[in-house]
Amino acid sequence: MSADGISGTGRHGPLVHRIWAALAAVLFVQCSPAAAYIGPSHFRLGDADLTPEGSGFEGWFRAESHYWTQEVELPEIRGINAAKDDLLFTVPAAPAQGSGFLAISIDKSRPAYDSMMDLCRAGQRIARATFAESSELARHPQEHGPKPDSVPSHYFYRLKDIRLECPEAQGAPEQAFALYFDDIEWLNFAPLSKSMRISASAAELGSLPITGLSRVFAITWFAASIDSHPDQCPRMNRKADDADYFRFLSEKEVTLARSLFGESGVGPERMAFRGPAGLNVALMPGIVPDPGHESPLGEVINGFDLDKEDGAGPPPQGVRRHRDFMSPDGRTGIDNQLFTVEGCVEGLRRSGFLPTIFNEGRAVGRPTALVEISGIDDEHDDDEVIVTFYFSEDYLRRSPMKVALPHYTYRISRNPEFSQDFARFRGRIVNGIVLTEPIESLHVHEVTAIETTIYRPRLRIELLPDGSMKGLIGGYLDWRRRVVWQTFRAADYENTIGFQAPAIYNAMKRAADGLQDPVTGEYNGISAAFEIEGVAAFVTPQRGTGHFAQRAQIMTEQD
């Protein structure tokens, strides 16, 4: 082991050959895209029976993240060059046949760590092993829609004649293992050359009230509520630099690398490969020591009391103890742990790169999100109203100065890509504020962005005197999918937004406070709030007052 805490030389032997090979991969080789997969996958030595759908993996080793190709190209951002299509199901990134590479990370606190390290240090080849990955977690992050019946809950593979390497990074929470196999066999799914087309049905919404007024708004802004006050961050998080890339190299190796990269230094196309033995830390963020993540100061942030607990007593079942906040209007017990992770990432704040570009994309593209409040008898206080979340395929109407214009009419989409995610909330109006009860989930479509699924969402909407509205959507995010949203473009996003994948991965994991898995006891959800704004609008009357979902599906089928 070298003084820098790394052992293992990697696929290409001495580091000099590995660095040259890495540069060649960037400059000359047509790389293969690799899906960002953060979440549990499972590994078992020898042949293993396929577990029944929905069952656990007792007796299997568990990995926290993995990827299939050594030199990966950045996956596409769908919607840049053509209309984005959610109704796809991406096939796995595993090779169809022959030799290949699989990198996995194992939490060092798990028994699997010692077992795998013993095998690796012994230099023993593994004759056969079985690997399983979730079909849903393996999808491209911009896809949305039901899993086809022909796709299993997990893909199972048999790997044959495996050479194992285990480059170590002292202080890392997870251990990387590189598996070089001579052959692969798909056990329960046939390899496909392209993504599968899928179908979806319009959401079943039920009937709207036939009395009372309705107010409709076209959404002009949607972004995480992580801005508390201008001075909330004494220090902002930073992107990785050359020192991070050279961290695990000897002086001789650093000198060589500097001569190869030149004065421009390590570019974002290589920065993600700063793990031990050149492994990718964007795809496996736990394999290097946690560089630390800056968190904002302050006790005030927008959000909701999602768990009905103020932090003084024991947390409710399914909730991990966490720090509560106060809202700007004085409400207590606010749960917004996403604020603690993203509040000091410059490119994620309201004026940052991603919210700005995503909302500009929303304004010049489709779909336009619509919110309708129905059954209003009194706009100041009303015991019962219905709030419906729609999508329109019409563009948001704007002036030549790019100001959203009110009072335009929008057609509600009949496309099941969007109508599958229409949602209806029951609510009330208190002092001019619309408050809803939670529902199971809400999926917010973006244009060229990663879409956002909020679990157990609820709305808070303020009806403003000028006819517009502002409000919040609160609930839980799957923190693993949120990290994929931030890292699937690897160091390209680290560089542009200003963070480090290993830091934000560990921060998310620590901050997760909800959606507890009933089997593992782990918390897969992080509490969050999203700001929304909208201008007054109208919708076409073709939807009727009741069974729009069913009518939309009929019209779609007729088309």
Image (spheres, rainbow, N blue to C red):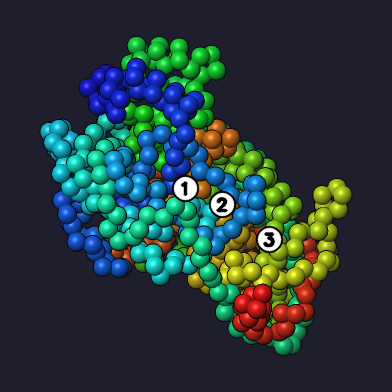
Residue type indicated by callout 1: Val
Local secondary structure at mark 3: loop
Q: Is residue 19 left or right of residue 231?
A: left
- Label 1 sits on residue: 484
Determine crowd level at label 3: few under 14, some 14-19, many 20+ residues with C-alpha closer than 10 A: many
**Can you tell which quarter of the image residue 149 is in?**
bottom left
Residue 511, compared with residue 456, is above or below; it is above
User: In percent of the image, x 33 and y 54: which residue is there?
Assistant: 133
- Observer-nearest of 468 and 217: 217
Across and down, in percent, residue 56 comes to 26, 63
Determine crowd level at label 2: few under 14, some 14-19, many 20+ residues with C-alpha closer than 10 A: many
Which quadrant holds the C terminus?
bottom right
C-alpha gap between disc 3 and disc 1: 23 Å
| Residue 437 visible, this angle | no
- Observer-nearest of 337 and 218: 218
Q: Is residue 340 left or right of residue 52?
A: right
User: In percent of the image, x 57 and y 37: which residue is there?
Assistant: 497
Residue type indicated by callout 2: Ile
User: In percent of the image, x 68 and y 45: which residue is there?
Assistant: 356
Determine crowd level at label 1: few under 14, some 14-19, many 20+ residues with C-alpha closer than 10 A: many
- Label 3 sits on residue: 367
- Label 2 sits on residue: 450
- Disc 1 to disc 2: CB gap under 8 Å: yes
